[in-house]
Image (tube, rainbow, N blue to C red):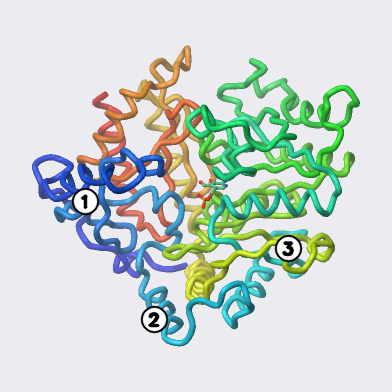
Amino acid sequence: MISEQALEELSFADAPNMITDAIPGPKTGELLGEAPEYESMTRGGGGFPLVFDIGKGVTVKDPDGNLYIDVSAGVGVNSVGRAHPRVIEAMERQSKILMHASDISNTRRGELARKIASIAPPGLKDDCITYFTQSGSGALESAIKFARKVTGRHQIMAFHGAYHGVWAASNALTTGDQYRKGYGPFMGGVIHAPYQYCYRCPFGLKRDGCELACAHYVDHVLNTPYTAADDVAAVIIEPLQGEGGYIPPDPEYLQIIKAACEKHGALFIADEVQAGAGRTGKMWSIEHAGVEPDMMTFGKGMGGDLPMAGLIMRKDLAQQLDDMSQPQTFAANAVSAAVCMTNIDIINEYELVERAAVVGEEVMKRLRTASETIPIIGEVRGRGLMIGIELVKDKETREPADGEMMMNVVMGLLSKGIIMVPCGRNGNVLRLMPSLTITRDYMNKAVDILLDVLNTL
Ligand SMILES: Cc1ncc(COP(=O)(O)O)c(C=O)c1O
């Protein structure tokens, strides 16, 4: 496994280091003030009071020179950190010979498709076809279209709390008022079922004794003639729910849903855009459940510093699709493909998947211990380096922390040089999703500051 010292050299030293009296500093403030004049605030970072200027490893500088530890890894993207020297080298090498190739074959995308097949999860490994896109939304959009074609059915089942993108079809699966209200109607034929969220069980049950009613409910919906789920092409699920609150379901939950899919003839599609690429301590989060998906999407951490996303399909399914029926002008740009392969090589050579499991366990243990004395920590959960901390106003009632509390936490962290972004159905879950290359020292510094901020609220 890669040494801590080798990882240390990938980032700026001595982070965090805040040199302005307040944040945003003057230069950052000016840029933030101008942004709404030129750029849409509908973007993910609209309203987040930070401007990135320079990124190195797990550290980032703003235009005023303040140095931060980024515990969000560009929202799960920079799996090997920003500007890894080998990524820069691959980028430089490839950009001198070929960058854009439209959707025509190029040497690097061919190599990448073979590499992806070699790291795919059981059920797809060495026997799958990859379809490339530029974003996670595009991958989900394509998964829906392809599932309909190969099954001849049209309905899609997704889950409460799901986030699968914000395009016409994927937005229909995505839940959450902020992405939906006023923008509909979305694609029809979508059925939402409960995700296994034991901290806030929709049935009011306790895990001890519930027998996974939520999973059996999915089976029930798919198997009776009275639920209007008469034409389901696919069940699309995040094996560890991301934007919905960093919620890891039990393996049996996913196993029961997979069995229901098989019984009913629906495809099981795992969305690994956020939880994939080693983040959870397995290469793919579905591997924790031992379930074999029929299709699987990927994005974020696979591409790292350049956009790369796509869909992996069972070969027999992919072979039923018509040639040239889903073109994408910018798919698998040769430089993005070269960078993605380098990312995968670094993840494997540094043993970052195994490291995510070990370091994640250490961090989770520390946070769980701290949660015993910090009244606003409701629950600590996750797998590997995909850790959610659900904040509450009251441990007993579990009333979610409100917007003001969350703003105080996020700004408290930012002013001390820690970048952490919230998620969750109520926006009250802090997510720890650092680059898999974060040193224990930087991880501990970030947790020290986090506990300090949470203790003073
Ligand atoms: C699970 C999941 N699927 C799909 C997407 C959409 O990806 P993108 O933002 O690249 O379109 C996201 C983004 O957060 C995601 O977390």
Which residue appears at 67% of the width and 75% of the height? 114
Which residue appears at 17% of the width and 42% of the height? 24
Mark on residue 118? Answer: none
Q: Position of residue 404 (x, y in %)?
A: 31, 23
Q: Quadrant of residue 277?
A: bottom right
Give whichever of discs 3 and 2 has the lower sequence position.
Answer: 2
Q: Position of residue 269 (x, y in %)?
A: 72, 48
**Ligand 1 contact, mark 3 (Cβ < 8 Å):** no
How packed is label 1: few (under 14 Cα within 10 Å), some, or many (20 or more)?
many
The type of residue carrying mark 2 is Glu
Report which residue position mark 1 lands on.
16
Closest to the observer, 274 or 255: 274
Q: Left or right: 206 with respect to 87?
A: right
Q: Position of residue 257 (x, y in %)?
A: 77, 38
Q: Secondary structure at mark 3?
A: loop
Which part of the image, by quadrant, shows the C terminus?
Answer: top left
The type of residue carrying mark 1 is Pro
How far is mark 1 from mark 3, CA to CA?
Answer: 49 Å
Report which residue position mark 2 lands on.
92
How far is mark 2 from mark 1, CA to CA?
Answer: 30 Å
The answer to whether mark 3 and mark 2 are in CB contact below 8 A is no
How packed is label 3: few (under 14 Cα within 10 Å), some, or many (20 or more)?
few
Above-or-below relation of 292 to 423: below
Q: Position of residue 243 (x, y in %)?
A: 51, 39
Report which residue position mark 3 lands on.
325
Q: Secondary structure at mark 1?
A: loop
